[in-house]
Amino acid sequence: MKKTLIHVQNSLLGNAQYKASPNKNSRPDPADIRLIIIHGISLPPEQFGDTCIDDFFLNRLDPNRHPYFKEIHSLKVSAHLLIRRDGTITQYVPFNERAWHAGKSSFNGEENCNDFSIGIELEGTDRLAYTDQQYLELSRCCRQLIQHYPLLSSQNIVGHCHVAPGRKTDPGDSFDWKRLEALL
């Protein structure tokens, strides 16, 4: 089994391609990482495999490339990781920094989940099944993060829908929580 490593010095995942997003800032307490939030994303909606997600997180999204992009191109968002449909991983923000992925959010009564969470995007939609490769890489990443950050546990892995109910639905009904739990 392939070993996923977090490089302590730079808080990066060893098997991920790193593309530095400007959409980040300092965490209030870099040691207070206690939640993993799973997201789903596709740009344009329900289309996969191009550079649009990278462009979005790097503030390079061309508003003229697709009608939907006119609505979102000026948003400043990011995630720590993106796991594509083929299992390829891109990291945009080091884990010790705050990525802008959860927005207005709450977990166990505490607001601003970006302060204490790691955001992992899965290339997909609420309606289409995620791939075997994505579940495999997601479970590997989660196990390594839990091993590296002592406040994390398998019980503290939630969907965007759980921390922003009524506002967000991802990763959606297509995400198999029992499958992820079995792989952890």
Image: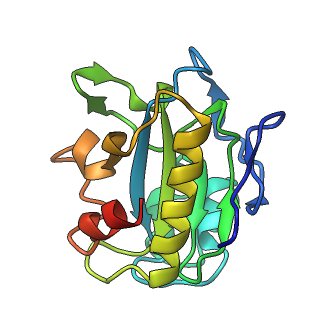
Residue extending furthest toward the right:
9
Taking 132 as reference, is 55 left or right? Answer: right
Taking 87 as reference, is 130 left or right? Answer: left
Above or below, 40 against 66 in this view is above
Examine the rendering and report whether any part of residue 73 can be seen.
yes
Which image quadrant for residue 35?
Answer: top left
Residue extending furthest toward the top:
28
Taking 7 as reference, is 162 left or right? Answer: left
- Which residue is found at the position 54% from the left and 46% from the top? 77
Work out whether residue 22 or residue 75 is closer to the camera in this orientation and state it: 22
Residue 90 lies, in percent from the top left, at: 68, 62
Residue 85 lies, in percent from the top left, at: 53, 81
Residue 28 lies, in percent from the top left, at: 56, 15
Examine the rendering and report whether any part of residue 43 can be seen.
no
- Which residue is found at the position 77% from the left and 49% from the top? 20
Taking 125 as reference, is 27 left or right? Answer: right
Q: What number of labels is visible?
A: 0
Above or below, 40 against 48 in this view is above
Residue extending furthest toward the front:
1
Residue extending furthest toward the left:
166
- Which residue is found at the position 52% from the left and 21% from the top? 32
- Quadrant in which the C terminus is drawn: bottom left
Colour scheme of the rendered structure: rainbow
- Quadrant in which the N terminus is drawn: bottom right
Work out whether residue 3 or residue 23 is closer to the camera in this orientation and state it: 3
Residue 44 lies, in percent from the top left, at: 48, 77
- Which residue is found at the position 69% from the left and 59% from the top? 4
Which image quadrant for residue 31?
Answer: top right
Above or below, 7 against 129 in this view is above
